Amino acid sequence: MVNSLFDITGKKAIVTGGTRGLGKGMAEGLMESGAEVAIIGTSDKVYQVADEFKARGFVCYGVKADLSDRDQCNEAFNKSCWATWTSWCRPTASSAVTPPTSSPTRIGMM
């Protein structure tokens, strides 16, 4: 079984864009391999998707945030880490995309 090769039981992860598409798939794969996952999404759908994962027996937390906003990004990271009871979360997976019209910024963590 593939999951036995990638057993990450007890690890924590943050997945951005976790409500659909690649992000949702990455979150699911991490949870199937044993990780506790915080998914970040831009709408209230993030809570629904987290509840769907929980109903399947996974440990999943939903965090709503617009990651193109520095303050929301910092807050989402902090909420995700607190939700998973750790001060350092890894692995991380990102499928969120910031439009190219946004200027890149350095994001200070905590």
Image (cartoon, rainbow, N blue to C red):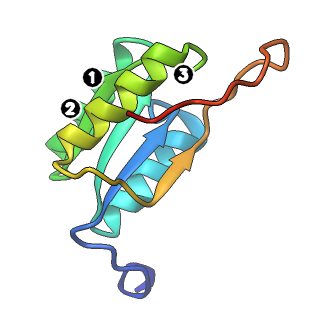
The residue that label 2 is drawn on is 51
Determine whether the residue tagged by mark 1 lies in a helix, strand or loop: helix
- Which is more foreground, mark 3 or mark 2? 3
> Disc 2 residue type?
Asp
The residue that label 3 is drawn on is 67
Asked if marks 3 and 2 touch (Cβ < 8 Å), the reply is: no
Disc number at residue 84? none
- Marks 1/3: CA distance? 17 Å
Residue 98 visible in the current orientation: yes
Q: Earlier in the sequence, mark 1 or mark 3?
A: 1
Determine whether the residue tagged by mark 3 lies in a helix, strand or loop: loop
Residue 66 visible in the current orientation: no
Q: Vertical placement of 33 versus 70: above or below?
A: below
Asked if marks 1 and 2 touch (Cβ < 8 Å), the reply is: yes
Task: Please tell me in which quadrant of the rendered image residue 22 appears.
Answer: top right
> Disc 1 residue type?
Tyr
**Where is residue 63 shown, x and y percent of the image?**
32, 26
Determine whether the residue tagged by mark 2 lies in a helix, strand or loop: helix
The residue that label 1 is drawn on is 47
Say which of 55 and 60 sits in front: 60
Give the residue at x 41% y 59%.
90
